[in-house]
Amino acid sequence: MSMLTRARHIGRHRGKTPAQLKKELDQADCTLIGLATEIDELRAERNRIEAQLDAAGVELSGARDDLRASRKLIRHLEAVVLLRDQQIDDLKRKIDVGVKAEHVIAPTQPVPVLPLHASPQAAVTNPGTVRQTSWGRDVETRPPAA
């Protein structure tokens, strides 16, 4: 093999030129800077999202406290309503018993309305006379002679 052939052969199979290597190095530096910028942007976005998550956690904690307080108030009000319903039922039962008793008493035992002066509690006008009052009739009697 001649020297010229040998030089051509080596020239075709040799590595990259310094200009090509410099160009690839510049491209790699640009890619590296681009990736570093993207990493910084992603970190900033992650920090923003973490801050939102923390704020949401605080709001959720407050909402849970409000929910607990509301449920406690609801249980208290339900107990009050239940007690009120029991009292209403008890009063209805008492009214029913009273109405039934009134229907039984009314026809069998009429109650007369007495004038005020005929009342058993009326003041005695004559100390020598004792008024005996019975339902509806007054009888003046003298005290028994002793």
Image (cartoon, rainbow, N blue to C red):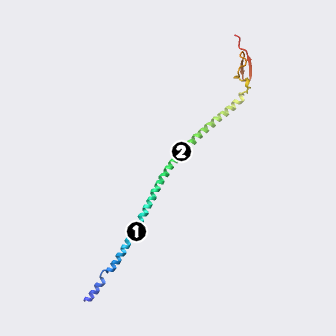
> Which x, y percent locates residue 100?
67, 33
Q: Is residue 119 above or below residue 20?
A: above
Q: Residue at x 45, y 61 (%)?
A: 49
The N terminus is located in which quarter?
A: bottom left
Q: Crowding near pointer 2: few (<14 within 10 Å), some, many (20+)? A: few
State the residue position of label 2. Answer: 75
* Numbered label tally: 2
Give the residue type at disc 1: Thr
Marks 1 and 2: CB-CB under 8 Å? no
Give the residue type at disc 2: Arg
Q: What numbered label is drawn on residue 70? A: none
The C terminus is located in which quarter?
A: top right
Q: Crowding near pointer 1: few (<14 within 10 Å), some, many (20+)? A: few
> Which x, y percent locates residue 64?
49, 51
Q: Is residue 113 left or right of residue 35?
A: right
SS class, disc 1: helix
Return the disc, 1 or 2, that comes first in the chain's sequence.
1
Q: Is residue 69 above or below residue 8?
A: above
Instruction: Mark 1 vs mark 2: give the one in front.
Output: 1
Q: CA distance from mark 1 to mark 2?
A: 56 Å
> Which x, y percent locates residue 13?
30, 82
Q: What numbered label is drawn on residue 37? A: 1
SS class, disc 2: helix
Q: Residue at x 28, y 85 (%)?
A: 9
Q: Depth check: give the residue in front, 99 or 54.
A: 54
> Which x, y percent locates residue 22?
33, 77
Q: Residue at x 73, y 25 (%)?
A: 116
Q: Residue at x 40, y 68 (%)?
A: 37
